Image (cartoon, rainbow, N blue to C red):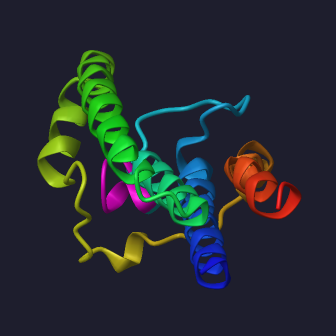
Amino acid sequence: MGYVLWPVGIGLVLVGMAIRIWSQQHVRYRMKVARDLTTSGPYSFVRNPVYIANMVIWSGAVVASGLLWFTPIALVYWLGVYCVVVRHEESRLLEKYGEAYRQYVADVPRWFPRLGRLADLEMVNKYFVKAVAVEIHCPLILVPYVLKDFMLS
């Protein structure tokens, strides 16, 4: 079964990593550059693309693990952490950006992307290399499963 699970798991991790890199180019979190309210790139489709990417990466880890019991743990984790974190971040962003953020919330959905804005796609910008450097750690989530499946068998 690993011959199916591993490619699917790795594929999901890579898709999640690509979304994180795309998001990072626009939000520029953990980069030493000026930041403002981000509404471009993936942030023009959905307000939380990094968290969605994290869920895709975790899904890849769950699939690669081959551990069915890990699925509800991941779901509870996502719901618990992201519901709390997003509410906290939204209140801080509203406080910091005021009406601009209120308008952004009215225009862009929190979790389920509105796909009608293809002009805002902008997949690569001048922060691409920095974004890759900041997100290069993402595949490390698979290390325990590599050890489990390939080193201990």
Image quarter in which the C terminus is found: bottom right
Q: Is residue 69 left or right of residue 131?
A: left
Q: Farthest residue in the front direction?
A: 153
Residue 3 in the image: x percent, y percent? Answer: 67, 84
Asked whether 47 falls inside the magenta stretch, the response is yes
Image quarter in which the N terminus is found: bottom right
Q: Is residue 49 visible?
A: yes
For residue 82, which quarter of the picture?
A: top left
Looking at the image, which residue is at 39% across and 77% down?
119
Looking at the image, which residue is at 75% across and 54% down?
148
Q: Vertical placement of 96 versus 63: above or below? A: above
For residue 151, which quarter of the picture?
A: bottom right
Looking at the image, which residue is at 27% across and 38% down?
79
Q: Is residue 127 visible?
A: no
Q: Which of the two residues, 91 or 87, is positioned nearer the viewer here?
A: 87
Q: Which of the two residues, 136 or 29, is positioned nearer the viewer here?
A: 136
Residue 142 in the image: x percent, y percent? Answer: 70, 54
Q: Which of the two residues, 150 or 87, is positioned nearer the viewer here?
A: 150
Q: Is residue 94 left or right of residue 139?
A: left
Asked whether 37 falls inside the magenta stretch, the response is no
Residue 84 in the image: x percent, y percent? Answer: 27, 24
Q: Farthest residue in the right direction?
A: 151
Q: Is residue 147 left or right of residue 75?
A: right
Residue 141 in the image: x percent, y percent? Answer: 67, 48
Looking at the image, which residue is at 58% across and 76% down?
5
Q: Vertical placement of 60 versus 118: above or below? A: above
Q: Which residues are magenta?
A: 42-48
